[in-house]
Amino acid sequence: MTDMIPAWINGTLTPVDKLQAHVDGVKHKAVSVFLFHADKVLIQQRAAGKYHTPNKWANSCCTHPHWDEDPRDCAIRRLEEELGITGVQPKWVEKLEYRADVGGGLIEHEVVDMFVIHADEVPQITLNPSEVQAIQWLDRSTLENKIVQAPNDFTPWLKIYMSKYASSVFGPA
């Protein structure tokens, strides 16, 4: 079974194979989550077996919703599938659009529903090794400095989020 995601073809929202959407650079729906505890945000290192941007650091969770899946429900689902995190309540902060070359001839052209979560306690985390190989909790300035020092270690979308949308995610600097 192929993984169908909502994409715009000739201006109409249509189910499209996820890999084909990236090959063709088709605009499609996405969800991104930033999970905070105190002043630190959780970032994840994508698994080595991912078909694009393997081993790169990304925000807490990012994915594509299923056809007709509510973005918030998608965020909750993928937090559990990727990180084993349950019982959190994502707060929608913004819808944004970006286009980025992710290597290997693939393009992410996403319309993203962005969510944040502020957890009072550090959540129980169980990494799904086919999705995530490592995590880090970083404050904003440390994350920004790491991106400047080693930009190739980070996904294109995390660099875009941090350069253009950080105030939506972190609040004003």
Image (cartoon, rainbow, N blue to C red):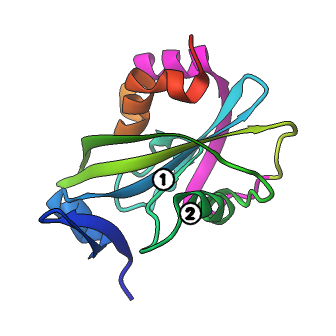
Q: Which residue does the numbered mark 1 point to in the structure image?
A: 31
Q: Quadrant of the N terminus?
A: bottom left
- Give x and y (percent) for residue 57: 49, 39
Q: What type is the residue that disc 1 sits on? A: Val
Residue at 66% across, 32% down: 41
Extreme residue toward the right, this view: 121
The residue nearer to you, when weighing 165 against 130, is 165
> Quadrant location of residue 76?
bottom right
Extreme residue toward the bottom, this view: 1
Q: Which residue does the numbered mark 2 point to in the structure image?
A: 74
Residue 147 in the image: above or below residue 58 = above
Extreme residue toward the top, this view: 173
- Give x and y (percent) for residue 153: 42, 34
> Disc 2 vs disc 1: Cβ atoms closer than 8 Å?
yes
The residue nearer to you, when weighing 156 against 36, is 36
Q: Quadrant of the C terminus?
A: top right
Q: What type is the residue that disc 2 sits on? A: Cys
- Give x and y (percent) for residue 92: 58, 44
> Which tag, 2 or 1, sits closer to the chain's start?
1
Residue at 56% across, 63% down: 74
Q: Which mark is residue 118?
A: none
Disc 1 crowd, CA 10 A, few/some/many (<14, 14-19, 20+): many
What count of labels does the image hold?
2
Name the element at disc 2. helix
Give the extent of the magenta segment. 125-150
Residue at 53% across, 65% down: 70
Extreme residue toward the front, this view: 12
